[in-house]
Image (tube, helix red, strand yellow):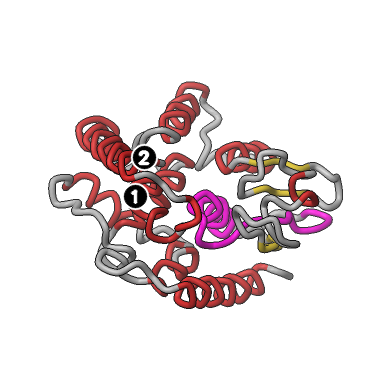
Amino acid sequence: MNNTTQPIVLYGVPFSQPVRAVMWLMLYKRTPFEMVLINPGSKGETGSRNPAYLSKNPGGTIPTIEERDTGFVLGEAHAIMCYLSNKYAWNDVYPADHRLRAKVDWYLHYHHRNIRDASIGLVAPKIRKDLDIPEATQQAARATLTKALHALEAGWLAESRYLTGAQLTLADFAAYVEIGQLQPGYTNVYDFEPFPKVQRWLDNMKQVDGHDDVHVVLAELGDISVEPPAMETIKNANKNALRTLKEKLAELTP
């Protein structure tokens, strides 16, 4: 555990894929943090489009972190994970070797308009009706995801246990929160049978410390392949996820 004057504040909601990546990294490294709920797209008091939040993150995205003792604020999940790894010297997940680190950065840059399309094409249209994502955009995103999974199958995971080699890194946390959410047992909206190496990697990631705690929200949400979830189901999933997170964080607080 890392000693800081005050725990870092993490703004977001457990259902957000990038928020889950940061949550998982911090739980994996047993680093206490404070979760402050920010509802994406809302202009309300706790919304990402509220002026108070926009003063911290002008893009209105989640997650954002804030160090209460220093006033430092940072948005974007990958930037946050890299910053935390640099700050605390988490060289196991973000290697000190320049070439090994560059491979992690390579994937993190690749992720945004490739694997990230899992949410745009398969999950968000059923969960975030307010986004009104056009069908053509959804189809294009699904095609992009499938192409990216072929790249992981034939390249990134062809001869290695994890995305950039034998060691778990930030790349794996970032990728799994997008790909893993599609599995049976969660939203069940994608067939991984054509991708045995990806499936093997998914199974490996399920064994990483903190996996179950971070993915309570998806386990509670359940299968959305046939029927979109009711708003009450989404709210309850977030509530139960927050309850689990609070219990886990209590274990990390001295």
225 vs 175, nearest the viewer? 225
Is 90 situated above or below 41? above
Query: Does the residue at mark 2 contact the one at mark 1 (Cβ under 8 Å)?
Result: yes
Q: Which residues are magenta?
A: 4-29
Residue 213 at what x, y percent from top left? 49, 68
Q: Amino acid at mark 2?
A: Ile
Q: Residue furthest top?
A: 99
Q: Position of residue 56 (x, y in %)?
A: 77, 44
| Residue 71 marker | none
Instruction: State the image quarter where residue 221 is shown.
Output: bottom left
213 to the left or right of 51 = left
Front residue (pair 224, 13) = 224
Residue placed most toward the observer, 1 or 242 = 242
Q: Position of residue 203 (x, y in %)?
A: 28, 57
In terms of sequence position, does the residue under pointer 2 or pointer 1 come before the other? 2
Q: Position of residue 184 (x, y in %)?
A: 25, 64
In the picture as drawn, the residue positioned furthest to the left comes out as: 194
Q: Secondary structure at mark 2?
A: loop
Classify 10 Å Cα crowding around label 1: few (below 14), some (14-19), many (20 and above).
many
Name the residue beneath numbered marker 1.
Answer: 179
Crowding at dot 2, Cα within 10 Å, few <14 / some 14-19 / many 20+, comes out as: many
Q: Residue at x 25, y 32 (%)?
A: 151
Queried whether the magenta region covers residue 10, the answer comes back as: yes
What residue type is disc 1 on?
Ile
| Residue ID at (58%, 61%) | 13
Q: Label 2 belongs to which residue?
A: 115
Is residue 181 rendered to the left or right of residue 189? right
